[in-house]
Image (cartoon, rainbow, N blue to C red):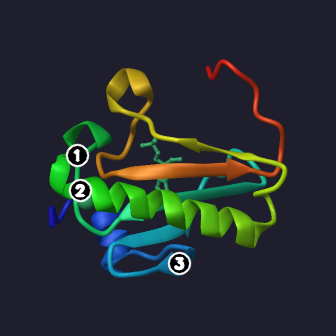
Amino acid sequence: MPSDCLFCRIVAGELPSAQIYADDSVVAIRDISPQAPTHILLLSRKHIASVRDVTAKDHDLIGKICAVGTELATREGIAEDGYRLVVNVGRNGGQTVDHLHVHLLGGRHMSWPPG
Ligand code: AMP
Ligand code: ZN
């Protein structure tokens, strides 16, 4: 685990977070700067810098992250009205933390296209 990675340190419990879900491969926390009434970050336990670094051996992990997203959207009461899963990739994609994560945003209408 890269010792300087913010999300590795959160997953390891070295830094505090508002954790709402954890299993052997995925941890979910509330975003520290929420952009919607519900703004959850789905983190891989394993350090992968970006979704563009995902390889065939990570396919189950990606499926798991999506399934946990569905479970948490249901738990948050936003599944029926709809929500958005967002993966920012690289500098132009707006990625600021280089550790695989999926944003789960909901509780308000989302506009399109994104900024
Ligand atoms: P991204 O810009 O896609 O890399 O997303 C990184 C997200 O991490 C942003 O939405 C930040 O608000 C969020 N964030 C940064 N630091 C923390 C933290 N300590 N706890 C929870 N969320 C954080
Ligand atoms: Zn990491």
Viewer-nearest residue: 38 or 17: 38
- Nearer the N terminus, badge 2 or badge 3? 3
The N terminus, quarter of image? bottom left
Q: CA distance from mark 3 to mark 1?
A: 22 Å
27 to the left or right of 2: right
User: Which residue position is annotated with label 2?
Assistant: 58
Q: Residue at x 63, y 23 (%)?
A: 114
Is residue 5 visible to the viewer in this orientation of the structure? no
Q: Position of residue 86 (x, y in %)?
A: 53, 40
The C terminus, quarter of image? top right
Q: Position of residue 34 (x, y in %)?
A: 67, 51
User: Which residue position is annotated with label 1?
Assistant: 54
- Looking at the rendered structure, the secondary structure element under dot 2 is helix
- Disc number lying in front (2 or 3): 2
15 to the left or right of 49: right
Q: Residues within 10 Å of mark 1 (few under 14, many from 20)?
A: some
Q: Is mark 2 in CB contact (under 8 Å) with mark 1?
A: yes
- Nearer the N terminus, badge 3 or badge 1? 3
Q: Amino acid at mark 3?
A: Tyr
Q: CA distance from mark 2 to mark 3?
A: 20 Å
When asked about the image quadrant of residue 91, the answer is top left
Q: Position of residue 53 (x, y in %)?
A: 20, 41
Q: Residues within 10 Å of mark 2 (few under 14, many from 20)?
A: some
Is residue 7 visible to the viewer in this orientation of the structure? yes
- Looking at the rendered structure, the secondary structure element under dot 1 is loop
Q: Residue at x 36, y 55 (%)?
A: 62
Relative to 11, does residue 70 appear above or below in the rendering?
A: above
Q: Residue at x 81, y 65 (%)?
A: 77
User: Which residue position is annotated with label 3?
Assistant: 21
Q: CA distance from mark 2 to mark 1?
A: 6 Å
